[in-house]
Image (cartoon, coloured by chain):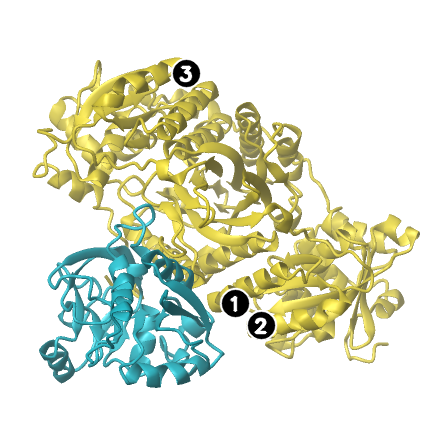
Chain colours: A yellow, B cyan
Amino acid sequence: MSEVPGLDTVAVALDTPDTPQPHAELGMAKDEYERVREILGRRPTSSELAIYSVMWSEHCSYKSSKVHLRQFGEKAPESDALLVGMGENAGVVDVGDGRAVTFKIESHNHPSYVEPHQGAATGVGGIVRDILTMGARPVAVMDALRFGPADAEDTKRVLPGVVSGISFYGNCLGLPNIGGEIGFGPGYLGNPLVNALCVGVLRHEDIKLAQAPGPGNKVVLFGSTTGPDGIGGASVLASATFDDASHAKRPSVQVGDPFMEKLLIECSLELYARDLVVGIQDLGAAGVSCATTELAAGGTGGMDIQLDRVPLRDPRLTPEEILMSESQERMMAVVEPAKMDEFLAICDKWQILATEIGEVTEVTPEEAERGGRLVMTWHGETVVDMPPRTASDEGPVYERPYARPAGQDALQADDAAALPRPADDAELRDQLLRVLGAPGVGDPAWVTQQYDSYVRGDTVVSAPHDAGMIRVADDSHRGVALATDGNGRYTRLDPYAGTQAAYAEAFRNVAATGARPLAVTNCLNFGSPEDPGVMWQFAEATRGLADACQRLGTPVTGGNVSFYNQTGDVAINPTPVVGVLGVIDDVRTRLRSAFDTDGAAVFLLGETRAEFGGSAWADVVHGHLGGLPPRVDLAAEAALGEVLATAADRGLATAAHDLSDGGLGVAIAEAALRGGRGVRVEVDGDAFTALFSESGARAVVSVLPEHKDALRALAAEHGVPVAEIGAVGGDAWWSATRAGPWRSRWTSCAPPTSPRCPP
Amino acid sequence: MTARVGVVTFPGSLDDKDAARAVGLAGAEPVPLWHADADLKGVDAVVLPGGFSYGDYLRCGAIARFAPLMSELVPAARSGALPVLGICNGFQILCESHLLPGALTRNSSLRFVNRDQALRVESADTAWTGDYAEGQEILVVLKSGEGSYVADEETLDELEATGRVVVRYAGGSPNGSRRDIAGIANEHGNVVGLMPHPEHAVEALTGPSTDGLGFFTSVLSRLTAGTPAHA
């Protein structure tokens, strides 16, 4: 028996092979549990069970999505720019001048529903640590959000909390929030989406990987202490093992401390700069379990950890709880023994607690063959002795059944083109105003005003413009632009085309600022993978994105999958959020979406077809979702992108704005309102189609008279249809006095209030 | 000789890089100062930048006030000798240190506010605003959650009467500040604190204007002229 009462050691496990274990309560299927027994040649200890259960969870192992995500690698286009691809904490892309950027988007949906403020805050914290772990200085964040209907009761609880959480954490970290998107829909009422993106800048030689090479090197845990955060699962183990009521209830949402994270960022960057770490991993989901198994698997395969040395916030924590704790603001480093003193001195300077908890060990060839050997002790007794690679890299992989849902044909047959259209000009105007003021279309300033967009002084473009843009360094004019887009309505109608449309929109948004798209990240928000209809949506969405990225030469560098976004049997509209990163050689040529130059001509680029399926007009005016989304023409998107980026390079345009939700009418209104100018536009043919169609591969640009011919020639060179449709300023009908109703409607989607946050 | 302007980094300072850039663009040499060192490194002036020093735990600026560096800074500032500019969190620290009267409280909206903000320069008679004209309107950045300036009526009257209201929010206060006050000075005019961020308005590309640069060129003019404030 163990010296520590109730401790489930390896020796105890060998002595009691038939002790029942709560694998099902930990979300582990019977065959998965049997596989653990097979790997270990005995029953797992409760600590080992804790590790396998979290590492093989859907969230950490991607067991349902892996077979589909492989396409991103298999279809990845050749790209000289890709320095680190999928599989690491985040992808790294070369942007020239010896500099690189790393970026990734990740979901924190479920925690943000349970506790909106902390859920969203820790979502930001987690993605920032991923970027830091790559060796980069985080330089900006963005967020893609979806909520239930704006007037729904629970939205008044969730929305202000999410926004305040992002605002609180990001602002306290000193990271500018440079954009993102917000949308509303009934399916998101019990399933809000909070997808946080972070981008970081580093030099090529500074890339860090999660690995633990060099036997004898020390394993150091630094940052916050470990507490009982986010270990709902572990309490099952603890209560099963200890029958102790004090462990029965634990909070399942983590609490964030951005001040600690800010110190952790500065401390880590100084440690990197002085070359004091050989391997690094942040502690996110699955905490110590994930960091130790991944670092060991990425190195020699061997590691010894003394779990009782982990500094605790609550001294009652058990080994299982320590392994599963998701306490925030923690990192794990592998440090050469000779550099330990200097490492600890830097941590002390930043008032960061650092504790040596173990070391990297040699493994025998036989152990290496099994997947390495990770040993953990608790006050001298062995509670874990397992091959780490079996937890980190060799989790279960499922080929979930998928099938096109029975109702899909009927949905697509319900064509939005058949909906009643405005009968006269007055109704046309009224419907345009309604679409312009709809939540998700209207001015998002009431959200973005709560985010610091200026800190660090490198923000060149930020919300509400088409993409965010950051200057990568003080001594350079080079910049990167980022946009995220997702359209659950399009994707519901056709997951393949809808996902490509999201990609195309983000691509277009980046190009509209003058940057050239280079690489992609994605956050795939879906319902339950156990529903064949949802799995079909997922399969189609991933295929669509992989094909589009291959076609336009922008590799997927990483991302995240969030399943189980559903209430009962009803899943959210599938919402793949696609982030596109582009590079601009000289940020001084960047374009914004405000028409603020009197006398400039307005040009429409691209072809308008009668496409209303999934449109904002169908939704806002008719509450309708049916038909097919706008056709995606990737060649046309590439050509348009080249025209926009070149127009910026050559200084041919004074502003550019992509066409998306709401079509031309909304785009012109936004550009005019942002510029504070009137705009006169004349359209040919059917005014309704011209104003409300959401055909892709389109943008509007404002052009000074002396550049009109050059712009026409540029468009012709790339085969992009071009039409001069109006002018900015002057005696435009949309004069300052008559803009009143437009502006008030545009800004009418006022923030829902909550009891905690009166207006 | 180039003036040397110190920029203090506390744990949780965020706009220190921006303040240093503004100092450099104004033509001075930015000198990093570390909160834990009771050493001003012989600088000619100091900027306390924005951020959340010490996590703003307890109260904004309340812990920073006890930093070793402040033990050197406070007497030099109080005597009128050392020009000090406190921006946002720096303003809060100056109030907590009793170098300036009053306090900053939660915005009346109870929300963080990030926006381009017009200010009216009320006094050009300080070490940090001499390059502006009184009555001049400037556009800088406001970004804060606890930016509502409060003081008792007597103090407010005295600030007005002695010309120590340095900048006011043009077009009304966005955060509930008494009498639309955005920034104030001490009686010597060497210590100025303001809630908005002039250091974010120093480059046309990244700021709403370049109007904020005047704060940093003003102190240079003052130092070059060799006249201590209100000498």
Give the residue type that dot 1 points to.
Answer: Leu
Q: CA distance from mark 2 to mark 1?
A: 7 Å
Q: Residue furthest front?
A: B1
Rendering coords of residue A148 (x, y %): 37, 47
Q: Is residue A52 left or right of A501 when viewed as pictured? A: right
Q: Eyeballing the image, is A411 above or below A143?
A: above
Kind of element beneath mark 3: loop
Both marks 3 and 1 on one chain? yes
Left or right, A266 with reference to B139: right
CB-based contact (under 8 Å), mark 3 and mark 1: no
- How crowded is the residue under tag 3: few (<14 C-alpha within 10 Å), some, or many (20+)? some
Query: Which amino acid type is shown beneath numbered disc 3?
Result: His
Q: Earlier in the sequence, mark 2 or mark 3?
A: 2
Real-space Cα separation, disc 3 to disc 1, in angstroms:
49 Å
Q: Provide residue A135's location: percent of width, then percent of height.
A: 60, 53
The amino acid beneath tag 2 is Ile
Chain at numbered mark 1:
A
Q: Quadrant of residue A689?
A: top left
- Local SS, label 1: helix
Labelled disc at residue A352: 2
Subunit bearing disc 3? A
* Quadrant into which the N terminus of chain A falls: bottom right
Q: Which numbered dot is residue A718?
A: 3
Measured as percent of width and height from the top left, residue A464 is found at: 31, 43
Dot 2 alpha-carbon crowd within 10 angstroms: few under 14, some 14 to 19, many 20 or more: some
Q: Which of these two is toward me, A32 or A221?
A: A221
**What residue is at 40 percent from the left and 83 percent from the top?**
B72
Q: Nearer the viewer, residue A116 or A312?
A: A312
Instruction: Look at the numbered discs 2 and 1 and tell me whether their residues touch, using CB distance below 8 Å.
Output: yes
